[in-house]
Image: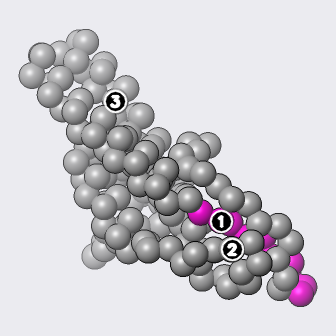
Amino acid sequence: MLYLGKIDYSWNKPQTYLVLVPGLSLLIEKIKSTNLKPFINNDWNNKSVAPNEKSKEFANMCKWHLRGSLIQMACIGAITVYALPLFSLLSLLPICEALYTYSIAMSNPVVIHEYSPSTGQVIRSNGVRMPSIF
């Protein structure tokens, strides 16, 4: 059974491609974002791995849902041009999803830490402002 809040995004995972389904991807994104937030306030010297993993997972979720929204808009745009005008109403879902993703990504900055494998100390901390598609 697939739990929508535990989807792991990767090119080789089939459940990742649910981000291409209008409406369902928005539902998945809402579930995942509520499971990931609130973030612990990450300062540059924080050595905890848990907030870093949440930040990475949030950044990955935003990337995949932005990619999915763009593909949805491209497909629905093609349908609109070549099919019945009724299908143009579907174009509102990925646009709303892209706006929603952008708003939560911009309101929740993440800090990603790179740790030394031998000592476990923080080598580098990078403040990432989403959205970053690639």
Looking at the rendered structure, the kind of residue marked 2 is Asp
Q: Residue at x 65, y 65 (%)?
A: 111
Q: Is residue 17 above or below residue 113?
A: above
Give how far across and how far down residue 36 sits, in percent. 44, 72
Q: CA distance from mark 2 to mark 1?
A: 8 Å
Q: CA distance from mark 3 to mark 1?
A: 30 Å
Residue 6 visible somewhere in the drawing? no
Q: Is residue 119 above or below residue 108?
A: below
Give how far across and how far down residue 90 sits, in percent. 18, 32
Q: Secondary structure at mark 1?
A: strand
Which mark is in front, 3 or 1? 1
The circle drawn on residue 24 is none
Q: Which residue position holds label 2?
A: 43
Looking at the rendered structure, the kind of residue marked 1 is Val
Mark 2: give few (<14), some (14-19) or many (20+) Cα within 10 Å.
few
Helix, strand or loop for the magenta stretch, by majority: strand
Q: Is residue 54 above or below residue 74?
A: below
Which mark is in front, 2 or 1? 2
* Residue 46 sits inside the magenta stretch: no
Mark 1: give few (<14), some (14-19) or many (20+) Cα within 10 Å.
many
Q: Residue at x 22, y 48 (%)?
A: 23
Give how far across and how far down residue 114 sits, in percent. 78, 70
Quick check: marks 2 and 1 in contact, CB under 8 Å? yes
In the image, is 40 to the left or to the right of 45? left
Q: Which residue position holds label 1?
A: 111
Magenta residues (range): 110-119
Q: CA distance from mark 2 to mark 3?
A: 37 Å
Looking at the rendered structure, the kind of residue marked 3 is Met
Label whose residue precedes the other's in the sequence (3 or 1): 3
Q: Which residue position holds label 3?
A: 73
Residue 84 image-quadrant placement = top left
